[in-house]
Image (spheres, rainbow, N blue to C red):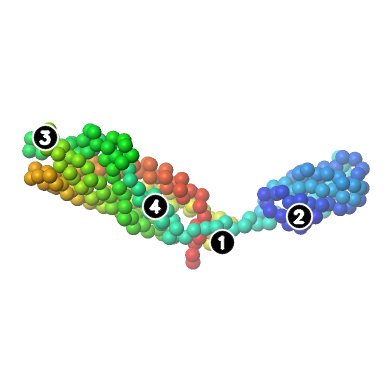
Amino acid sequence: MPATGPPDGGTPIVITGSGFSHGALQVSLCGNPVVNAAVIDDARIEAVTPPGEPLQACALAITDGTRTAELPSAFAYEDLAAPGCVDEADVAQSFSTLIDQTICLPSPLFQFDLMGSAVVLCPEGSLCSGGQGGCDFTFKEAAVSVDLAARRASAEFTGVTIMPVDVGTTLRCTAELTMIMTLTAELDLRATQWQGIEELMGVGNVTLALSSLDVNATGGLLCGLLNLSGGLLQETIQGLLDSYTDELFAALNLELGGIYVCRTQ
């Protein structure tokens, strides 16, 4: 029989000896029954190894119900092959790819009073590129930093949206909102049996914060006053980002959970 095989089992083995045709036999490795044991003749048994533990040395036992013959260390399960792993740059790229996307902000986005006129950003009837009601908001230009030693990832990126703005019932402006945002996340890394390789179980404590907001509105003098409304909008935008954090958290865990990370010394 071969001396070694993978821990997931499935290795064909041949056992040679004598007296195998005398009654029903039970064959086991490390106490676990082998698979598809077949007595070929008095001197030969063929079987398949069951699953076992990596690096486990197993005794082979053959019993006919009353007597047992045992061969110590007859078979050893091999170590699991080291999986492929990614480095900090690969993890950072995954973060950047997930951040770099367009979402649909709901309409109406925000409403306030300006010199006695109701101002509505992204008013009812606005449509996102996907056809649903709202205004497109694009995340882009992400600068991501991943520190495996500190088990932390962070990113600074820009978000841009161009949306219609109704002022009163007669004036429509166009406002471009440019935002600088920061993302932080903790990396749940677990040690593995392979030196220099850790498993990234997922991310946690994801925060998405609005650092700055710039409003550039065009369409007339009254529209220009919207450029002073950044402070009013910031709390609303932060609320939208808070609601998007759960979606981003789920996407990051789906993308990154379970990958193996190479730790360079």
Label of residue 170 in the image = 3
* Mark 4–mark 2 CB contact (< 8 Å): no
Q: For this view, does 26 lie left or right of residue 217?
A: right
In the depicted structure, whether residue 200 falls above or below residue 26: below
Q: Amino acid at mark 2?
A: Phe
Q: Measuring 36% from the left and 50% from the top, which residue is drawn there? A: 99
Label of residue 195 in the image = 1
**Distance between the alpha carbons at the discs numbered 1 and 3:** 68 Å
Q: Quadrant of residue 221?
A: top left
Give the image location of residue 168, x and y in percent. Answer: 11, 34
Q: Quadrant of residue 78?
A: bottom right
Give the image location of residue 212, x and y in percent. Answer: 23, 51
Q: Crowding at label 3, few (<14), some or many (≥20) Cα neighbours within 10 Å?
A: few
Q: Earlier in the sequence, mark 4 or mark 2?
A: 2
Give the image location of residue 14, x and y in percent. Answer: 82, 52
Q: List the residue tagged with mark 4.
A: 97
Q: Amino acid at mark 1?
A: Gln
Q: Nearer the viewer, mark 4 or mark 3?
A: 3
